[in-house]
Image: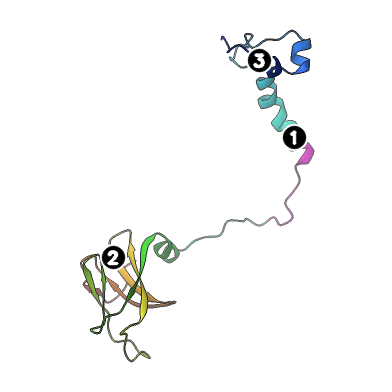
Amino acid sequence: MIWPLPRAHDLTAPERAAGLSWHEGGADGLHPSCRGARHAGAGSYNARVGRAPADPSSAFVPVSRHDLDQILCHEEERGVARDNTVVLDGVVLQIDKQRGLRRGTGLRVLVHRHLDGRHSVWWGPRCLGWFTATGRPLRERAA
């Protein structure tokens, strides 16, 4: 394999002393300096600096489906109208009466549009309702 012409500072001193040039590729087509770094460097480095973890437990934690539904969605803040509705991209979402909440008028809520097209309305950690893609209320949240 023919390598591009090197500049004087492209070769290291040991390479120049060994009489190597960029035109001398090995059977695998790699320059000798690249070949050594890939094959010998990683193993010896890991042997020198590798050690057992301080905490042997896994760093990965399971994620429930509910968490992904809340993370992988489009979210916008909206205000609740006088008739307890919220509008997102032309879809009207009618919020039912909520226990402990006299009126929703003027309340700032987050409207989530999920990947499957459903909508949900949230006031802090409290879910005020789930809706189909067309705005019809869902009595129970489908998994």
Residue 131 position within the rendered picture, expressed as x and y whole percent measured from the top left:
26, 71
Crowdedness near tag 2: few (<14), some (14–19) or many (≥20) residues, C-alpha within 10 Å: many
Q: Say if 22 sits above or below 96 in the image.
A: above
For discs 3 and 1, the disc positioned in front in the rendered view:
3
Q: Which residues are magenta?
A: 47-56
Give the amino acid at mark 1.
Answer: Tyr
Q: Residue at x 70, y 18 (%)?
A: 9
Residue carrying label 2: 118
Could you tell me which residue is drawn at 40 percent across and 59 percent down? Answer: 72
Please report the residue visible at 74 percent of the width from the left and 34 percent of the height from the top.
45
Q: CA distance from mark 1 to mark 2?
A: 51 Å
Whether label 1 touches label 2, CB < 8 Å: no
- Type of amino acid at the residue the image marks with label 2: Arg
Residue kind at label 3, given as amino acid type: Arg
Element type where label 2 sits in the image? loop
Q: Which circle, 2 or 3, is nearer the viewer?
A: 3
The secondary structure that most of the magenta stretch takes on is: loop
Q: In terms of depth relative to the viewer, which is nearer, 86 or 113?
A: 86
Q: Which sits earlier in the primary sequence, circle 2 or circle 3?
A: 3
